[in-house]
Amino acid sequence: MSRNQELTEGIIRGDRENVVRLVREDLEAGHGPVLILNDGLIPGMEKLGDQFGRGEVFIPELMAAAKAMNAAMEILRPLLEASGVEPLGKVVMGTVKGDMHDIGKNLVCMLLRGAGFEVIDLGVNTSAEQFIEALENSGARILGMSALLTTTMNRMGAIIETIRRAPFGEEVRIMVGGAPLDEDFAAKIGANGYAKDAPLAVDRFKELHAALQP
Amino acid sequence: MGDGAMGTMLQTAGLEPGDAPERLNAENPEAVRSVHEAYLQAGSDVITTNTFGGNRRRLALHHAGDRVFEWNKAGAAVARRAAGAQDREVIIAGSVGPTGSLLQPVGDLHFDEAKNDFAEQCAALAEGGVDVILIETMSDLEEVRAAIEGARAVGDLPVFCTMTFDTHGRTMMGTSPEEAVQATVDFGVQAFGSNCGNGPGEMEEIAEKMIRACRGVPLIIQANAGVPRIEGDQVVYEAGPERMAEHARRCCDLGIRYIGGCCGTTPAHIRAMIEATKGSDGKGAEEG
Ligand code: B12
Ligand SMILES: [Zn+2]
């Protein structure tokens, strides 16, 4: 097995210790951080993400992989930045007001961090005002909102309207998610994107981020 | 026969969206009692206390972590009062839901901390007069074990447990119905089963799997009325009383002893389910 394949397998198994060891050794051997990330770590997350989508692995496996990924990113991030790779940008995330479900949102946060985003997680029960304040203070222009209840998902439209009325509101790219939502609903309430699970969410966040770049 | 949903019914009775339903046990017990009475009138033999989110971690999200004892005891007591007005025997099941946090190693919550929270809640339910502890909507076997050990640590009430298999036929943590039955029987529950999920159709498949693996332990099935969807401004659950009645009959034929409803079911559903299973053989649901 090649070094990269070993890394990929390490991520899939959620073997954090081995992943960290392999990353360190590869760096010492002179491999570049970008290649380690793109050819070793990311393929692992992608494969596991597909398996999660098909119901072949579940939350424990995805969490373990995300933890291994995050540990590797801790090592790589400063090197990536030093070599001029722009960080992927900031995302504000939260579960909307009246809703206490956060397992899915937390998974999305973990995978976003693993992918290189900086995530400002506002937790559960988040009001439009709190979202606006966090966007304002952080300068982030990407927002993710989660809702698991039919009652709270029905209030997402009003939250989006309030955010749009903020001075920078039209610039904000808004992703929504949670089990009862779908693509149509997201479009209807004026969101910029939707994803049905955490691995797909990362892809959509990356697209939104790329589209925001001048 | 068990009962149906509580939360959705309380919402119509003045529960603020997002607030802890357990608050009403102390502050508006009459509202809770009238939901119990509606299910008793429909014919439920088991009623479930309004304490699903009554553990310390969940109540702390509503800044009410210090009300665990009061609200759970009150929840048990109001169910007991509603049952006392009946001229037949009614069983009070003390509802115990998940902590809402993932246990180690997947998440951060320590097993002993979870166990202590469950013990605290179960002690209050016992004090309020429940007949059994009903651990519900569980996804993680470690959390189930913490809940069972917590219940055992403070008393000797029977312990029932139901898990939710809503992700490709497994719990969201990946546990299959067969694995769940095996493990919980080893943990020593008096009855095991499934609640909530993706509606009666999937539930019947889950029931068949559990029947084959249950080693004689009585089984519980409390399906929700399908997955809710939005029509205009209305939330509609796809399974009406007729579909749930058919479901109850199928579960009964499979040999399920304790059948009830979960989210989206109402006294009308339960009434239809009882009607549909009346007079079925000894395994029938009416014994509850
Ligand atoms: C676990 C759970 C709970 C736990 C939550 C623990 C926690 N810390 O989150 C507890 C027990 C606390 C709970 C409480 C309640 N729950 Co609940 N719960 C669930 C359950 C079983 C699973 C949710 C879950 O975590 N799934 C696993 C995660 C990984 O999936 P996910 O959340 O969908 O997230 C994925 C995607 O949606 C997406 N995603 C998520 N967020 C985002 C955000 C963005 C931006 C993007 C792009 C993608 C994305 O990526 C994630 C990973 O792949 C669901 C049933 C279900 N199948 O959804 C019911 C469910 C959501 N609950 C329900 C109900 C009714 C309740 C309660 C009202 C019950 C009560 N009587 O107290 C309370 C409400 C409390 C409140 N105010 O919020 C109902 C809602 C029905 C309705 N009409 O809306 C459901 C659907 C059960 C049912 N079948 O009826 N619940
Ligand atoms: Zn339910």
Image (tube, coloured by chain):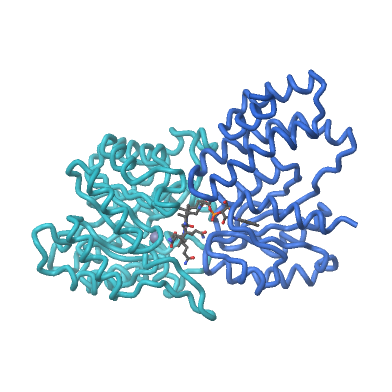
Chain colours: A blue, B cyan
Q: Vertical placement of A26 versus A106: above or below?
A: above
x and y, in percent, of residue B242 in the image: 28, 75
Q: Is residue A99 left or right of residue B130?
A: right
The answer to whether B229 appears left or right of A122 in the picture is left
> Residue at left 48%, top 60%?
B20
Q: Is residue B107 left or right of residue A86?
A: left
Identify the image quadrant of the C terminus of chain B: bottom left
Image position, residue B237 (x, y; %): 41, 72
User: Which of the image's four quarters has the N terminus of chain B?
Assistant: bottom left
Where does the image place residue B168, in percent across and percent down from the top left? 44, 52
Q: Quadrant of ligand 2?
A: bottom left
What residue lies at 70% left-to-right and 65% top-to-bottom? Answer: A128
Locate residue B250: give its quadrant.
bottom left
Q: Residue at x 40, y 61 (%)?
A: B198
Q: Quadrant of residue A85?
A: top right
Determine the image quadrant of residue A140. Answer: bottom right
Residue B216: percent from left, percent from top? 17, 43
Please tell me which residue lies in front, B262 or B254: B254
Of residues B201 and B51, the one drawn nearer to the viewer in this rendering = B201
